[in-house]
Image (spheres, rainbow, N blue to C red):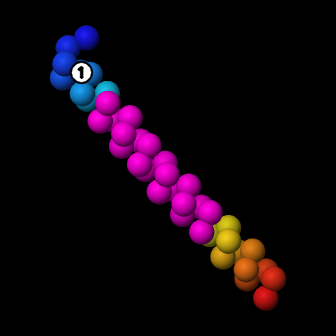
Amino acid sequence: MSKSTFYFVLLVMILVDVVQSRYQKKLLDEQARLAASQEA
């Protein structure tokens, strides 16, 4: 495997990880907001 391919794959994996963690945080925030609004 060439170096450029290796770095490309690495970059994609990092990007996916960042996007997933952001999305997960967004989902958790929305769940917390829904739970809070149901209790009120």
Q: On the picture, is 19 further left or further right than 25?
A: left
Residue at the extreme top: 1
Residue at the extreme bottom: 40
Q: Where is residue 15 in the image (x, y as percent from the top left)?
A: 36, 43
Residue 18 painted magenta: yes
Residue at the (56%, 55%) spot, across then down: 24
Residue 26, relative to residue 6: is it above or below?
below
Q: On the picture, is 16 further left or further right than 37?
A: left
Residue at the (20%, 14%) spot, across then down: 2
Residue at the (25%, 11%) spot, across then down: 1
Quadrant of residue 5 within the rendered picture: top left
Residue 27, relative to residue 15: is it above or below?
below
The disc labelled 1 sits on which kind of residue? Thr
What residue sits right under mark 1 in the picture? 5
Q: Secondary structure under badge 1?
A: helix
* Magenta residues, dominant SS class: helix
Q: Where is residue 11 in the image (x, y as percent from the top left)?
A: 29, 36
Quadrant of residue 35 within the rendered picture: bottom right
Tag count in the figure?
1
Residue at the (26%, 22%) spot, across then down: 6
Residue 23 painted magenta: yes
Residue 34, relative to residue 10: is it above or below?
below
Residue at the extreme right: 39
Q: On the picture, is 23 further left or further right than 39?
A: left
Instruction: Point out the stretch of residues depicted in magenta.
Output: 10-29
Q: On the picture, is 33 further left or further right than 6?
A: right
Q: Where is residue 10 in the image (x, y as percent from the top left)?
A: 32, 30
Residue 36, relative to residue 19: is it above or below?
below
Classify mark 1: residues with Cα within 10 Å, few (<14), some (14-19) or many (20+): few
- Where, quadrant-wise, is the C terminus in this rendering? bottom right
